Image (cartoon, rainbow, N blue to C red):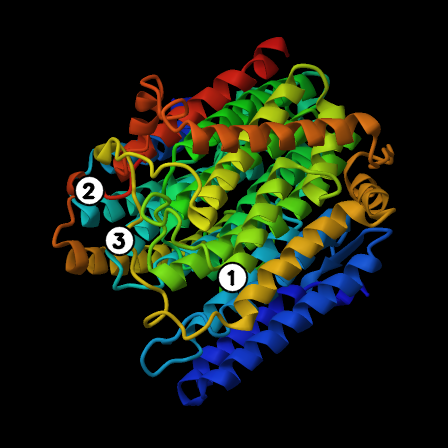
Amino acid sequence: MTTVMHVLPYLVAAYVFLTGCYGLATSRNLIHAVGCLAVCQSSTYVLLLAVGYRDGATAPVFSDIKPGSRPVVDPVVQALTLTDIVVGATVTALLLALVLQIAKRHGTVDPDELRELRG
Amino acid sequence: MHHLLPLLVAIPLLGAALLVAVGRHLPRIAAEITGFVVSGGTAALALVLLLNSSPPMVEWVGGWLPVGGESVGIVVVGDGPSLGMAALVSLLTLAALAYSWRYFDEPPRGHPGAFTALMLLFQGAMCGFAIAGDLFNAFVFFELMSVTAYALTGYRIDDPKAVQGALTFGVVNSLGAYAMLMGIGLLYARTGELAMAKIGRGLDAAAGHGGADALVLASFVLVLTGLLVKAAAVPFHFWLPDAHAVAPTPVCMLLSGVMVELGVYGVWRVYGTVFAGPGGIPAADLTRALVTLGALTAATGAVMCWYQRHIKRLLAYSTVAHTGLFLVGIGVLTPQGDDGVALYILGHAGVKAALFACAGVLLDRYGCLDEHTLHGRAREMRATAVMFAVGGLGLAGLPPFGTGLGKAVTEEAVGGPLTVVYVAASAITAGAVLRVTARVFRGLGPRPEEADADLETSGSEEEPETTGPLRRIPDTMRMVPAVLLTAALAVGAVPGFGDLVARSVNEAGSGGAQASAQWTVHGALLGLASTALAVALAGLAVTRPHWTAAPDWSRPLRRLQSGHVGDYVAWLLMGATVLGVLALPAVLGG
């Protein structure tokens, strides 16, 4: 049972990543595609937080607990996740701005109709 | 001296922030001079640090030194290759800024500093990626340089193709970066470390006497997927021609000249520091993976390059072909191979940036980048014609160009049948460039017939990057390619430079093993052979167009470049699977 519980977050991360990729590959709308990219990125949050998890541990905030008095989860991966969220917000914002501009210039956001660049 | 390392990132970032903050109130000339000063200052700093990089420097940013072997700080590494890449990035940014001095006639309304600020941000991010000593910061700088590159690619937001190419670029590269981050997470889970050198030691300690296990293989595949997307290895390469064909010319110079090469550098750095130990991926498996993908990349890039009529796309595919050659060179894991690739990257950066700069002159004069439409129209541009032809010869590896020296040294390192790949790929890409020179600048041969319109991007309806043709070509636009070509020539021609590069690369990379990088008769003859082959191919293409027209077997290959972002994502997943299969014996054998 515990083995399953320990492996489960990693399987969830892989599943979320592949779901996002499937959405990207089959997308019929670029806004949906950018959303799928954000789904792919969410899988990295799941993975990083799963890496730092410890049984029975609390948040690594030492304002109300004494250091060493009880186990805390790994703060490094939490910092990584926060950085990752900032990166993701930037990427999503920029890509959505590009989609907006594509909609204005091409009059469509369907990737099937955007085939000018080929060969 | 090592305390100055973080300034390589900080100076361009601060310069960019300054321009964004006050750019609205500055006249254009003040914004551009600020850009020059900041970018040039960073270049000077990178060169000074490079000259003092023996022994290699390590800096813990902000004084967060490791305590008892444990560290949470940010580590940056200043050795020959990292500072060499930072210096190359900075010098090329300076060249691109000089080129764009008069090139963009209209800065965005009310914000003349925007382009310069983005260029400085790009420079800072690339320098940061080059000197990053821990994997997570490598990821952060990787994303920063990617995001800036998307913005620069789509800089002309009114051009429909530019925004489309930038979006494809963005989706594929970001997906690669997330794969890389998952790999980094797995490595952290195994070792509890983020600094590359410590991860490497941690993997060795965790493996004990066994070899790599499934987790190490998975993290290897995920990290390399991210880096190979950036390096545009087949089948991760589809974004590159789309992005390079639409980006503004000064940006193309940086994308092709150094950003793609940073992906190759990343593969070299990460394998050498993280996975090369007994707990990582055995050398034979890395060689199998990189040589296979590299040779495939070189072949695909060369074939696709030959059948392009859009001049910037043609140059973009030649970058794909050359990246394949770089990957083969670092894949054989010999000190000599590393030296050869380092020299090849230096020479290639100069030559490729110069060729893009000449293409930009054509785009300014004729508002068109189509080889067929431009047939014979650029006869009066003698100087540009000479530079384009010289660039083509440099691409072929004509001695004493730096590309020639790098190629010769790498060929000697890889040996055997792989030499054929080097000669053929460089000859075909150079032949395509020389063919363009003959047709566009000399009007030689009959005008080519129109072929499959549904299979190609013609380049005849390009948005001009300048408001109408400039009255005359600005001197900066002619000087920059000339200087770049001279630099590429100097890399191979200055005696002792090759050995200098070899010493500095080997000190960092191959544990003290030294190799020399000098011209040999054998190497010079191979360089001459590929040049002769390139000239022959170009001559054949011009005089007998139907002999070299696209044969039927090339149609499926060209159809793969469908312009559909979903297809490219599917290819990325397949590429990661192939990479895993190629490296699988690492786990089965242990």
| Residue B346 relative to residue B144: left or right | right
Residue in front for this viewpoint, A62 or B351: B351
Identified by mark 3, the residue type is Glu
Q: Chain of mark 2?
A: A
Give how far across and how far down residue A49 sits, in percent: 43, 44
Local SS, label 1:
helix
Q: Is residue B124 visible?
A: no
Few, some or many C-alpha atoms within 10 Å of disc 2 (few <14, some 14-19, many ≥20)?
A: some
Q: Earlier in the sequence, mark 3 or mark 1?
A: 1
Q: Which residue is mark 3?
A: B461
Q: Look at 75% across and 25% down and name the residue there.
A: B413
Which of discs 3 and 2 lies nearer the camera? The answer is: 3
Give how far across and how far down residue A68 sits, in percent: 60, 53
Identified by mark 2, the residue type is Pro
Asked if badge 3 and badge 2 are on a common chain, one would say no
Q: Which residue is mark 2?
A: A111
Residue in front for this viewpoint, B134 or B307: B307
Q: Look at 68% across and 47% down and name the residue there.
A: B346
Asked if badge 3 and badge 1 are on a common chain, one would say yes
Q: Which residue is mark 1?
A: B122
Q: Are marks 3 and 2 in contact (CB under 8 Å)?
A: no
| Vertical position of residue B556 compared to residue B38: above or below | above
Tell me the number on the disc at residue B550: none
| Vertical position of residue B57 compared to residue B4: above or below | above
Distance between the Cα atoms at labels 1 and 2? 28 Å
Identified by mark 1, the residue type is Phe
Single out the residue that lies furthest toward the top. B589
Q: Which image quarter: residue A104?
A: bottom left
Few, some or many C-alpha atoms within 10 Å of disc 1 (few <14, some 14-19, many ≥20)?
A: many
